[in-house]
Amino acid sequence: MKKMYSNKLNIFLFLVPGLILFVGVLVAPIIASGYFSFFDWNGIGEKVFIGFKNYKELFTSKPIGFLRALKNSLLLAGLSVCIQLPFCLWLALKLGKGIKGERFFLSVYFMPVLISTVVIGQLWLKIYNPDYGILNVLLRAVGLDSWAKIWLGTKETALGAVFIPTLWQYVGYHMLLMYAGIKSVPKDLREAAMLDGATDSQVNWFIVIPYIKPVLRVSVIFAITGSLKSFDLIYVLTNGGPLHSTEVPSTLMINMLFLRNRYGMGSTIAVLLIFLCFGFALLVGLIFKEEED
């Protein structure tokens, strides 16, 4: 009996540092954001309790533009799920067959994930530069001068120009997750299907993809929540401009907190982002669970 209690005490003592870190870094800021969202506060002076007015203003005030920012994030999430993830799956299926130079291609595709987002932002700023950027230089070289634009400075093109590097950066991340899942598919299943006359496409569709559904679920959740939380690359490229055309909830939140000194409103955006991420994660989990059932 004493040994059992001693083991439990040791387990508790080992868990305490991690628990304190978890509560201090994750739980406490969420509670604080929820608390501050009910106040009108500039971060320094006296807090004024206003209830749910911040939430109401967020959805009804056009100058704030939260709905526009949320629409941009949802569009990015849709592109991630419908374009990025299928492309990642295609790459993973190709590499999972054991092609020549497999390790090399894995390293190349995963490299953007390892590079600092600020560095990637600077790289794409050079690519999109209207004067010496490689994109406009190539367009002019092939006689398409009219297609050359100020990609990040024009309202009509800025959003698409920002989304391309955002999607490109994490292709290797999702591809590696799916690749690991594909490599775990038992060879017996593949060989049995091939003996029955199944083609590579049929093996992938009826055996490999159903087998890696748990991995696909994780990738979809990461893609959607990552799109909703997207900030750093968009901040480096456009900071939400021009004319708020590339604004997303995270850039709007930073704007409210540090430029407008509206800590209550910034906390409100943070709370809504948390609920949106948890909500979509639960929704994706339910969709995949229903398909499995």
Image: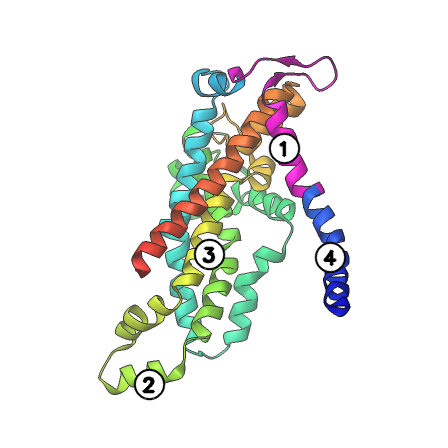
Residue 254: mark in rendering: none
Q: Residues within 10 Å of mark 4 (few under 14, many from 20)?
A: few
Q: Amino acid at mark 2?
A: Glu
For image coordinates 48% across by 59% down, the residue present is: 174
From the viewer's perspective, is residue 247 above or below residue 139?
A: above
Q: Which residue is mark 1?
A: 31
Q: Which residue is mark 2?
A: 191
Q: Is residue 101 magenta?
A: no
Q: Amino acid at mark 1?
A: Ile
Give the SS element for disc 2.
helix
Q: Are marks 1 and 2 in contact (CB under 8 Å)?
A: no
Foreground residue, 25 or 159? 25
Q: Earlier in the sequence, mark 1 or mark 2?
A: 1
Q: Which quarter of the rendering shows the N terminus?
A: bottom right
From the viewer's perspective, is residue 276 above or below residue 176?
A: above
For image coordinates 53% across by 40% down, the residue present is: 229
Q: Amino acid at mark 3?
A: Val
Q: Amino acid at mark 4?
A: Phe
Q: Which residue is mark 4?
A: 12
In three-dimensional space, the C-alpha distance between marks 2 and 3, rounded to whole angstroms, equals 27 Å
Q: Which residue is mark 3?
A: 218
